[in-house]
Every structure is written in C-alpha cells, then in structure tokens.
Amino acid sequence: MDKKEVLVREEILGSNRKIAAETRVRLEKEGILTVNFLSSPGAGKTSLLERIAEALKMNHRMAVIEGDIETDLDAERIRKKGVPAWQITTGGACHLEARMVARLIPEIPPETKFLFIENVGNLVCPASYDLGESLRCVLLSLPEGDDKPKKYPKAFATADCLIFTKADLLPVVPFDLKRAEKEALEINPKLRVFLTSALRGAGIAELVRFFIERRVNMIQRHA
Amino acid sequence: MDKKEVLVREEILGSNRKIAAETRVRLEKEGILTVNFLSSPGAGKTSLLERIAEALKMNHRMAVIEGDIETDLDAERIRKKGVPAWQITTGGACHLEARMVARLIPEIPPETKFLFIENVGNLVCPASYDLGESLRCVLLSLPEGDDKPKKYPKAFATADCLIFTKADLLPVVPFDLKRAEKEALEINPKLRVFLTSALRGAGIAELVRFFIERRVNMIQRHA
C-alpha cells in the first residue's frame, strides 16, 4: 500500500471504530447481545443461523442482519424461520461496516435479546471492521482444511469463539481437528471452541447455551 | 465508500491495469501461458495445482506463484512436486497485485511454458485485480454451496473458466450442479466449465488439455 492509501484507510477505520463503539454501548444497554459471524463463502453461516433460530426463538426474541455482495437469498431463508431479518447488499464491497449496522438499529423490534450479523463471506477483510458486536465468532468448515487458522490469522486473532461447521463431513474430508484447534489457540488462547453440524443439528444446543450465558454476563456488567 | 476513497482506489486500479497489460504482453511473447486461480479459502487451489503438476510437468515446464496472507506452506507443497514455486505473503492484504507478479518475472526459468498463480483465498477482492494473466479460472468447491455464483458474481463474470472442485463430495453435500452451472453461465456465457476431484484425480486430464490448447492458440496469435 502506498502512503496515501494507508492514510485514507486509517481514516476509514478510525471513523468505523467510533461508530462501532457507540453501537455496542447502545445495543448492550438495551439488553441485546450482538454476535458477528465471520467466515469464508460457503462455510455455513446461514445454515447455522437457521438452526440457532430453531433452538432460540421459542424463548428469546432474535433478529438477523444479513450481509452479502448481491442477492437477498439469505435474509429470505431466515425469515422463513419466523425471525425478522434485514439484507444489506454491499454491491461489491467485501465487508460490512459499522455504519451499515447502526442505520438498522431503529428497526429492531422491542424485546429483542439477540442480534446476529452474518458478514460478507470473506475470511480476510471483515476481520478489520468492528461492527459494534459484543461477540465475534469465526466459522471454519471442515472441507476448507485444517491449515486455515495459520493462513488467515486475523479472523482467528480477533474472534471470541471458533465454530467448526459441517462436522458431519469429518469421515470423508482430510481434516485434522486437533491441529486446527491447536493452531487457532496458539493465535488466540481465549477462543471458545465449538464443533457443529447444521445438517445433523449437532453442537447447536451447546452453542446456544453459550450465547445465553454471555448475554446474562453482559446484563450483569451493565446493571 | 466516500469520494476520497473512490479516487485513491481508481488510481490504484489504473496503475495496476497498466502493469498487468505490460506483464501479459511480456509473458505471452516468451511463450508462457499465465493462469490466475481465484477462489474462497479452502476451495482446493493448491491440491488442484499439485495434480496439474503431476499431469503437466513431464512434457511442459511449469512454475507457480503462491499468494497468501501468511505462511509459505503452499509453495512448499508445490516444490515437493519438483516445480519451482515462489511464495508471496501479503502480510494482511486480501489480494495479489500486478506489481507483485511483475517483480518475479526475472526469476522464471527459461523454457517455462505455464505459469500458475494461486491468488489469496478470497472470492471478492482478487476479482478486481488483473495480474497480467492470459487466463483466469475461478474454483468453486462443492461444499461451498450452489448459490455462490449469484452471491459473488464478479469472480465469475471476469473468469474464463469455472472449475468445480471436490467433486468426490457430490454424494454427501447438498449441491445442485446444474443450478450452479446455469447461474454461472447466466453471469458469463463464455465460461468453460470443468468438474474435478483432486483427491481422486478426476477431470484433471481434461483441464490440462484445455490449458495446452489455449497455449497453442496464444502462440499462434503472437506468431
């Protein structure tokens, strides 16, 4: 990057951080735990959200913001689960930014307890943009390979939890779960690790319990 | 994006296009067909290149440029196949640029006929950067899902061929091959489509034949 590019980028990131910090305070004070999902395209973010909706929505109102370059296919899938969802299409941009999320806050129905944000499918750029979330989760699907934490370290370094997805494929893809977990924890020892299969419903209850616990902690922190 | 950001970006892309155009002429006149591989992280670019090396290197010298954010794991894998390989680690940047490739041209051994470039794993940003390639291939692995062409159209719109990878997983993942192919061809009717499995070696011979044909056409065009 040349000098001018670096300066413009720093300005953008600075302004993004400010909006994100305001968003976080505002949402947390309203009792909303916001979770930002990051992953490669096709790691299964929407399928995981469909399962979370099934497990969570009976007892806790939730809402979803879907980020995509084009199409509103994902928001449609979430709405079919009876959950309010907004699609942000970035029209080419490779990540969501805090202002895109902030703009949607007035639309969130009262009594919402969880707001999930599905970022644009990209394991690189979204890691640099705080959206005002309380919790960041990086998804790694088994077919992507166990070398990904080392090759894309920033997404793993900035996340609070690592969710392995498509666990049902473990018998048929070359993936060393211990290696991936070890290398991710070397980058970020604080990561909470989950193993899930949206197709089979495995690991979802544990993940949802974790979100509920985190929300309780958040409310106690603001009390 | 704000106005300043747009201007800086246009300047960068303009300068990139110029270097790419010079690179293309230079490499093509030396009889080198350069192929730029684009995909999500973990779609199987390196595994496909290992198979291509096995099929190609007996009769045609080839070389590989590996792009990654961090680590030189991929170049190491290619060198084990007896093929010269250079690793570019971008240190955070989400795509390769033409100048990174241009800088390596003097290193390419004489008589090299094919130069493969493995871009950073990212289905978004690399699509905007011409590297001076003669041919661009987008890889889509079956576990990523059949909705990806519509959701990430630029990579498919700017490619010359679409390579489905991990075809061995077709029986165990929900993927409608006809839908993915149809929607990709709607975006770009000129796409040549290949179905491959690096694990089983399927479809590699056909792909390699296509590269050899394209190189013959290229040489005739410059004769």
Image: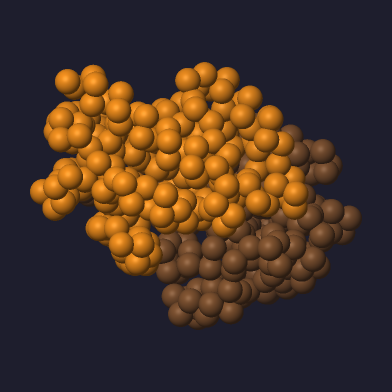
Chain colours: A brown, B orange
- The N terminus of chain B sits in image quarter: top left
Farthest left residue?
B106
Q: Residue at x 37, y 47 (%)?
A: B56
In this rendering, the count of numbered labels is 0
* B221 or B159: nearer the viewer: B221
Farthest right residue?
A58
- The C terminus of chain B sits in image quarter: top left
Measured from the top left, where is residue B125 in percent x and y? Answer: 39, 41
Q: Residue at x 46, y 31 (%)?
A: B161
Judge from the rendering whether residue B101 lies leftward or rightward of residue A41; answer left or right.
left
Judge from the rendering whether residue B10 lies leftward or rightward of residue A140; answer left or right.
left
* A161 or B124: nearer the viewer: B124
Instruction: Identify the image quadrant of residue B29.
Output: top left
Q: Is residue B210 above or below residue B66?
A: above
* A76 or A34: nearer the viewer: A76
Measured from the top left, where is residue B174 in percent x and y? Answer: 74, 45
Q: Residue at x 64, y 36 (%)?
A: B147
Instruction: Identify the image quadrant of residue A80.
Output: top right
Q: Is residue B102 above or below residue A171?
A: above
Residue A89 in sight from this viewpoint: no
Measured from the top left, where is residue A137 in percent x and y? Answer: 59, 62
Farthest front residue?
B59
Measured from the top left, where is residue B99 in percent x and y? Answer: 18, 43
Residue A149 in sight from this viewpoint: yes
* B2 or A107: nearer the viewer: B2
Judge from the rendering whether residue A200 lies leftward or rightward of residue B112; answer left or right.
right
Judge from the rendering whether residue B50 lies leftward or rightward of residue A57; answer left or right.
left
Q: Residue at x 75, y 42 (%)?
A: A78
